[in-house]
Image: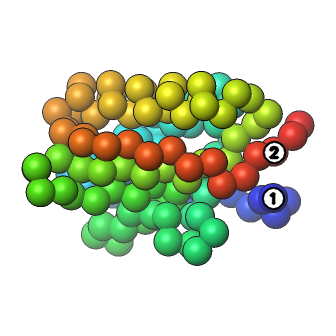
């Protein structure tokens, strides 16, 4: 359960760092987070049970998304999400499709997408 008043998936960076500038990996992390949050049923992102589900680059930290470069030249994306009471398998497929679509539009190669539901909130 997320503590009351805690922001979900906060990006710790000055406003200027949220532009398209910066590393491709950081751009992908921001894109993946936005795509996931656009899916009905996704409440927020989460740092994971170990606190290690984030992407950091150039002073920016995108919580709830890990992007790792792979040998094929693309990326492996893992998302740690907090969701509402919805069909989780369907939600995972929708998140994965949205991330893949948006990455393709941005010209970023994604090899694999893993969606982890860390918590479920009932409202």
Above or below — where is 111 with respect to 15?
A: above
Left or right of residue 57, residue 42 in this image = right
Whether the residues at callouts 2 and 1 have beta carbons within 8 Å, the answer is: yes
The disc placed on residue 1 is 1
Give residue 49's position: percent from left, percent from top.
Answer: 63, 69
- Give the residue at x 74% y 29%: 86
Instruction: In this rendered view, identify the residue nearer to me: 112 or 95.
Output: 112
User: Can residue 113 be seen at all in this image of the molecule?
Assistant: yes
Q: Quadrant of the N terminus?
A: bottom right
Q: CA distance from mark 2 to mark 1?
A: 7 Å
Return the residue nearer the eye: 96 or 12: 96
Residue 59 percent coordinates (x, y): 35, 71
Q: What is the quadrant of the C terminus in the image? A: top right
Left or right of 23, for residue 35: right
Q: Where on the picture, by quarter, is residue 7? A: bottom right
Return the disc, 2 or 1, that comes first in the chain's sequence. 1
Give 59 or 34, whichever is nearer the viewer: 34
* Secondary structure at numbered mark 1: loop
Residue holding disc 2: 121
Relative to residue 39, is residue 55 drawn left or right?
Answer: left
Near-viewer residue (19 or 100): 100
Q: Residue at x 42, y 27 (%)?
A: 98
């Amino acid at each position: 359960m997320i503590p009351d008043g805690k922001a979900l998936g906060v990006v710790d960076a000055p406003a200027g760092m949220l532009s398209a500038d910066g590393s491709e990996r950081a751009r992908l992390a921001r894109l993946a987070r936005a795509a996931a949050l656009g899916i009905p049923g996704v409440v927020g992102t989460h740092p994971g049970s170990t606190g290690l589900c984030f992407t950091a680059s150039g002073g920016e930290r995108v919580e709830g998304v890990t992007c790792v470069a792979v040998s094929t030249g693309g990326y492996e994306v893992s998302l740690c999400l907090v969701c509402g009471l919805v069909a989780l398998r369907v939600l995972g497929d929708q998140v994965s499709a949205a991330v893949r679509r948006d990455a393709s539009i941005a010209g970023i190669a994604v090899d694999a997408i893993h969606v982890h539901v860390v918590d479920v909130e009932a409202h």
